[in-house]
Amino acid sequence: MKTLVVGLLCLAWVSGCGGPAPIVATATGTATAEAHDHPEGHVELSSMQQKAARLQVEAVQMRSFSGDFQASGTLTYDKDLQVRVTSPLPGKAIELKAALGDKVTRGQVLAVIDCPELVRYKADYHEAETDYRLAQQSLQRRRALALYGDDTRRPLEKAQNDLATARAELDVADISVNVNLQSLRRAEDLLENGVVSKAQWEQAQADYRESQARQRLAKVQVELTRQHLAREQRVQKMGLLASKETQEAEANLERAHERAQHLREGLEALQADPDGHGSLTQIRAPITATVTARPITLGESVTPEEELFTLVNAHRLWLWVSVLESELSKLRNGQRVEVSVTAFPGQTFQGVIGYIAPELDEKTRSAQAQVVIDNPSLRLKPAMVAQVRVVTGQKKSLVIPAAALQKVQDLDVVYVQDGSEEFERRPVVVAGRSGEWIEIAEGLKVGDRIVTQGSGIVKGEDLKSATAEGGHSH
């Protein structure tokens, strides 16, 4: 009975962290408190106490260590696959062909907008197309007349003057392009600062494009007059006649074609049918995606600044994780990684390191890394918490079980057995973690015997002693 009482008292002392001093039995069977004075960070536990606490002590060894990098973050949409759809011109929504949650394909019509401004743009384009056809007919007629000798002599001096005039017009066009480019850049800066409206910026953009068109026309005119001058010089030497009317028809044809093409491209940019009539324009999906927002309502007036639809394609997601400075060497762009989420335990998804920030956060001493994850089955959802793991290769390292590591005063420590019943708290420097194993850079050597199982009980006794002596607290 005495032996049983002693054993129970010892077990109660070990399991009751923060309790009274150890209880031992006297020769007469009565229990008294045994007080020991130990240096800070030293703990004494008898073999019976160690057995009752189920302590395990193992020798530190060199082991094969994978050097895995592990981190966690929150899944987000791929910004390249998330699009805000707007109307290119002011108007009114007269048809809505996509609803919230609909899956749409690239080019699919989402809405039909009535834009009165389109009427004027289309009229200008159709007029330019008519001018182009008339210029073609005029050139054909002049060439036919030339076959029958219906030509007029073009003096060499007149051809030289035309070339000089064309060059002067090109110089003016170059200056106009530069001036309008500066105005456009200034409008962009002012738009960012909220000084000008988007309409003013669009006008500056239109002026710049118009000056570019005039510049192209001037270049064409210079080239045509240069060719004409060379032809006139040859004609002058050969004594032949040149056709002024034919040359003018060719130049008119080039100008009409350039203007018509410019207006057609503008209408296509507005998602309008250049060959159609009326003021309706169709808003089409720029990507294959799912409609995640549709703030517009039927019959509502819209402007180019207002969002009509938000489209998101979740077939590819992003995961941002923080990488400590000491672990940056383990990662590189294009590196394949494994991703896991709580929703699918035991399953992994493949990802690729897409970007590593070139700068560190001064406070955390870490850099942001982007993991790109293909999600064809759409099982992964934005806002899920995900873990990323990178296997960086096997190496021989000083490795201890994770259960052996404790935290005391923000320091990583282990408890080294110093004699059969003495344990010393020893600070260590952690180099890496991989699952249940920890790589140690400093503080231990091969053969050191450390507490693996039950290290938390030893820590509790260590801190209890330190508190009782007026030393450090938890």
Image (cartoon, rainbow, N blue to C red):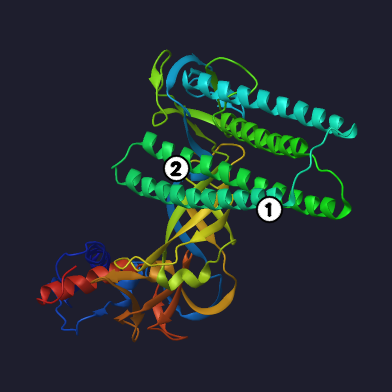
Identify residue for label 2.
384
Comparing 424 with 194, the one in front is 194
Q: Separation of disc 2 and disc 1 at Cα? A: 74 Å
What residue do we see at 75% from left, 35% from top? 245
Q: Does residue 382 lie above or below 365 as drawn?
A: above
Q: Residues within 10 Å of mark 1 (few under 14, many from 20)?
A: some
Identify residue for label 1.
160
What residue do we see at 20% from left, 71% from top? 463
Q: Is residue 401 left or right of residue 346?
A: left
Comparing 334 with 198, the one in front is 198
Quarter of the image for the N terminus: give it.
bottom left
Q: Does residue 220 lie above or below 388 as drawn?
A: above
Comparing 136 with 363, the one in front is 136
Q: Amino acid at mark 2?
A: Met
SS of the residue under disc 2: loop
Q: Residues within 10 Å of mark 2 (few under 14, many from 20)?
A: some
- Mark 1 or mark 2, which is nearer the start of the sequence? 1
Q: Amino acid at mark 1?
A: Gln
Question: Residue 285: x and y, percent?
Answer: 56, 29
Question: Residue 330: x and y, percent?
Answer: 52, 70
Q: Is residue 111 left or right of residue 91?
A: right
Total number of numbered labels? Answer: 2
SS of the residue under disc 1: helix
Quarter of the image for the C terminus: give it.
bottom left
Comparing 362 with 297, the one in front is 297
In the rendered structure, find residue 135 and report the number of the disc placed on it.
none
Q: Quadrant of residue 22?
A: bottom left
Question: Residue 157: x and y, percent?
Answer: 70, 52
Q: Is residue 312 visible?
A: yes
Question: Residue 287: x and y, percent?
Answer: 58, 34
Given contact means CB atoms under 8 Å apart, are the residues at marks 2 and 1 in contact?
no
Q: Is residue 186 left or right of residue 285?
A: left
